Amino acid sequence: MHLKSEGMGNRKIAKHFNGMGHKTHTGKVFTHNSIQFIIKRNQERMKNLEMINQEEKLVYGKIKVNF
């Protein structure tokens, strides 16, 4: 995410990781698609964490029940 925020594209990030000798969790080289998937999953995780950490505000209205 740091490299993406600096303006690097997915292909450049993949090339950077491959140049450093990093491999994916399956032992393959990085591609622009693998970088795109990693970024997408990270954004989904961050969104889910935000939802978990939000306090729920319960709002009660004036309810009248007649029997």
Image (cartoon, rainbow, N blue to C red):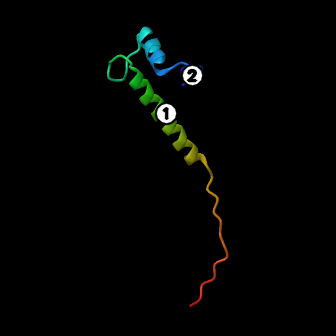
Q: Which residue is drawn at the image coordinates 44% and 13% (left, top)?
A: 15
Q: Which residue is drawn at the image coordinates 52% and 43% (left, top)?
A: 48
Check disc 2 and report the residue beneath it. Answer: 2
Q: Is residue 29 left or right of residue 55?
A: left
Q: Nearer the viewer, residue 33 or 48?
A: 33
Q: Is residue 48 left or right of residue 18?
A: right
Q: Which residue is drawn at the image coordinates 36% and 23% (left, top)?
A: 25
Q: Nearer the viewer, residue 7 or 48?
A: 7
Placement of 45 over or under 32, stated as above or below: below
Q: Nearer the viewer, residue 8 or 21?
A: 8
Placement of 62 over or under 34, stated as above or below: below
Q: Which residue is drawn at the image coordinates 58% and 43% (left, top)?
A: 50
Local SS, label 2: helix
Image x and y of residue 67, in percent: 56, 91
Image x and y of residue 38, in percent: 44, 29
Image x and y of residue 21, in percent: 41, 10
Q: Quadrant of residue 27?
A: top left
Q: Give the crowd class for mark 2: few <14, some 14-19, many >=20 residues within 10 Å.
A: few
Q: Is residue 15 left or right of residue 2?
A: left
Local SS, label 1: helix
Q: Nearer the viewer, residue 61 or 31?
A: 31
* Distance (Cα) linking label 2 and label 1: 12 Å
Where residue 30 is drawn, which disc sits there? none
For the image, the number of numbered tags is 2
Check disc 1 and report the residue beneath it. Answer: 42
Q: Are marks 2 and 1 in contact (CB under 8 Å)?
A: no
Q: Earlier in the sequence, mark 2 or mark 1?
A: 2
The kind of residue on which mark 1 rests is Asn
Placement of 7 over or under 63, stated as above or below: above
The residue furthest right is 62
The kind of residue on which mark 2 rests is His
Quadrant, the N terminus: top right
